[in-house]
Image (spheres, rainbow, N blue to C red):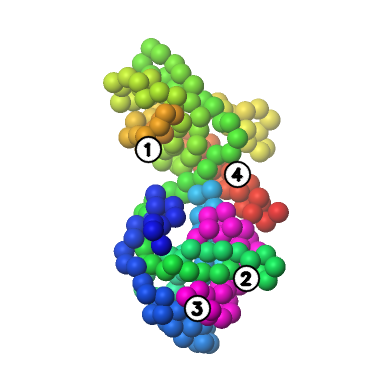
Amino acid sequence: MESLLYEDQLRLLERIEPDDILNRLALLAQQPKPALQFFNYYKEVPVSSPVEILYVFGDTLACRVSEVQSRAIQNSRYTIIRSPQLGRDLYATAEFKEETNEVILSDFAYVEVLPDRRTTLRVKIGGLFRLAVEAGPDTFEAKLRDLSLGGCALEIPDKNLLGKFAYFYLNFSFDLKNYPQPQQLRIMARFLRFEGEGPPARGIFLFEHDKRSEDLVGMYIAQRQAEIIKELKM
């Protein structure tokens, strides 16, 4: 394993020899209630389910999980194994074999799952969700990529568009179920940092909510989460 997949979500703690962890997992699987779970993020939404260990073959482990979990694994190409008996999160690269409905695990390592530190749920935004960003007297258009109750990630054409300002107004238009018209929001947000090199630049912003904006953003996140889960189940 040259590097971890999705290194922005995982921090390597310790690489493991295959024999050591495969023997340990095989022993756990023989217990009456092994309590082994697979865990993945799909478009930032956490997905988990119990895992059935089938057999060990060489340096790999064959397992079976729910259909929803297998789809999340196909998207990410890795999974996290969690169990109270392991003590730490166990990373493995994962390949789904459609012909046998098996997940083949290899390249094990103990990791820290960085999104676990978040205090609020984050969701990826599909399609072209554009919003107007007010930077002092100027306004430019950005794409909404991720959204949480605490803030958002925007794709910005040029870093220089932010100027030297620390606070901005972000203008959202949310299509919400049970609301006949799109809900317009103008939220003050503090710029936190850029992520990655770009261009385009990925900027992280923290919201300064009022009650209405907090309620509507929370409703949109819940709606988007339901859409993502429905997508996995299709």
Q: Which mark is residue 58?
A: 3
The C terminus - image quarter:
bottom right
Q: Which of marks 4 and 1 is nearer the N terminus?
A: 1
Q: Tag 3, which secondary structure?
A: loop
Q: Which mark is residue 196?
A: 1
Question: Residue 20 placed where, x, y %?
Answer: 38, 80
Instruction: Name the residue located 41 percent from the left edge and 80 percent from the top edge.
Output: 19
Q: Residues within 10 Å of mark 2 (few under 14, many from 20)?
A: many
* Residue type at numbered disc 2: Glu
Q: How far apart are marks 1 and 3 (CA)?
A: 38 Å
The N terminus - image quarter:
bottom left
Q: Tag 4, which secondary structure?
A: helix
Q: Distance between the residues labelled 4 and 1?
A: 29 Å
Q: Give the range drawn in magenta.
A: 50-78
In the rendered image, residue 61 lying in the magenta stretch gets the answer yes
Instruction: Name the residue located 55 percent from the left edge and 39 percent from the top edge.
Output: 125
* Residue type at numbered disc 1: Gly
In the rendered image, residue 58 lying in the magenta stretch gets the answer yes
Instruction: Tell me whether circle 3 and circle 2 mark residues in contact (CB < 8 Å).
Output: no
Task: State which mark lies toward you, 4 or 1.
Answer: 1
Instruction: Name the residue located 58 percent from the left edge and 44 percent from the top edge.
Output: 224
120 or 54, nearer to the observer: 54
